[in-house]
Image (cartoon, helix red, strand yellow):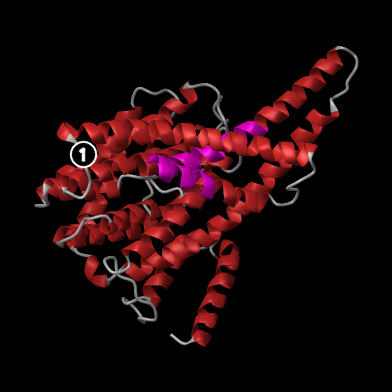
Amino acid sequence: MAPATWDLLIGALLILMALSGTLLKTLPVSAAALYLVIGFAVGPGGLALLRLDLTPDDTLIEHVSEVAVLLSLFAVGLRLQIRTQLSSWTLPVLLATVGMILTVAFMTAAGLALHWSLPGALLLAAILAPTDPVLASDVQVRHENDGDELRFALTAEGGLNDGAAFALVLLALGLLGAHTLGVGGWRWLAMDVVWAVAGGLALGWTCGAAFTRLTLFLQTQKQQALGMESFLALGLIALTYGIALHASVYGFLAVFVAGLSMRHVERTTVAKAEDAVDKGRRAEAPTLEPGLKAQAETAQAMTRDVLGFAKELEKFVELGAMLMIGCLMRMSMFTWRNLLLAALLLAIARPVAVYLTTRRSSRWTPSQRRLGAWFGIRGVGSIYYLAYASAHGAAGSELDATASVVLVTVAVSVLLHGASAAPLMRLYRSTRKRPPET
């Protein structure tokens, strides 16, 4: 494609991205769906201006989707409300573990019924397991003080299971002979489950807290790093992910928790300042130590600026990721088998897993449970795992079949969930009597 044509295409896409919020308000189409269609139109399935294929381009696809997921996970973690009660986290953790395992078991059985091998069926199910943090903006928490149980659980689930799904992908690759599982699977259990998950959680919390406290110290005590929050945020993401890779822990999980930790430090600093003011008022001396006040104000400004920057990056991430996915698609992929598997995942496996996982929980109302069962959005996380599997040893006709199913499922999810998210969430907000207690 000529440089001038590239300039026209990129310029038009950026303008479309800027205007999409206004243009699509009256249409039952999400921005992601629009980008997906444009990607298909400029790809081999349409005008063939840009060509992408999984096998020769798996490393490029892996890296692009990896960056997209990392930026989105950090933003999601930073946007989440920090809840100190462990019971508040029970539902998201169950959805990201038990719910995901049930979904994988169901889809593995479906793959076997359609004559996939066990490793191939498990790989397909594991790739489709994570819900998506990039495309779920309409059902995520809207701000850090959003106490809605449904949005909190779906947001936290997307942050957690994008890392937890890695263990199941590695198990499938091990059964295919492309990853070391150890005798009886001991190495997979010890290293890829226990160490990688626990290490990712610990590393992310430590990096996020240490980074935020150091930045606050430099800004309030040394008057350094002022106005550079955006670069610091990118540095935190890259540093946390790099350490995670070297430590063989799950970087997606670590970056998500780093965002959570950063928000926690900000909230803790502000709470200390507010507590000091209350104590001063009770003592009839409403004064506040200047250093503590400065730290609280700086912490709020820093997290606000970082979150604003992250939200802007999310828009670029969504555009780039969906264009890439659209370019990978072909009309020949929309076979009855692929559409059947997509329908089984979105309409049966996800709802059944959610209902079984949450049936004893009182934190969701029946309407919240129905919405939670429907909004199992699949997207960029699945594309990353697909490209990772291709780049790390998976091959053959089953990988081609898996790629077709994954791309069709993502396309169907983007179209259906994208069209239904805004109206369903508006209806949900309008019928909700009051926000649940947190």
Residue 233 in percent (x, y) is at: 61, 48
Q: Is residue 250 visible?
A: yes
Q: Is residue 390 above or below residue 279?
A: below
Residue 91 in percent (x, y) is at: 41, 29
The secondary structure that most of the magenta stretch takes on is helix
Q: Is residue 119 above or below residue 194?
A: below
User: Residue furthest toward the right?
Assistant: 285
Quadrant where the N terminus sits is bottom left
Q: What residue does disc 1 label? A: 181
Residue 260 counted in the magenta span = yes
Comparing 249 with 156, the one in front is 249
Residue 235 in percent (x, y) is at: 58, 50
In the image, what residue occupies the spot 31% across and 34% down? 191
In the image, what residue occupies the spot 75% across and 33% down? 296
Comparing 261 with 185, the one in front is 185
Mark 1, other Cα within 10 Å: few <14 / some 14–19 / many ≥20 = many
Q: Identity of the amino acid at label 1?
A: Leu
Residue 248 counted in the magenta span = yes
Residue 223 in percent (x, y) is at: 80, 43
Instruction: Name the image quarter holding residue 25.
Output: bottom right
User: Is 230 positioned to the left or the right of 388 in the image?
Assistant: right
User: Residue furthest toward the front?
Assistant: 246
Residues drawn in magenta: 238-266
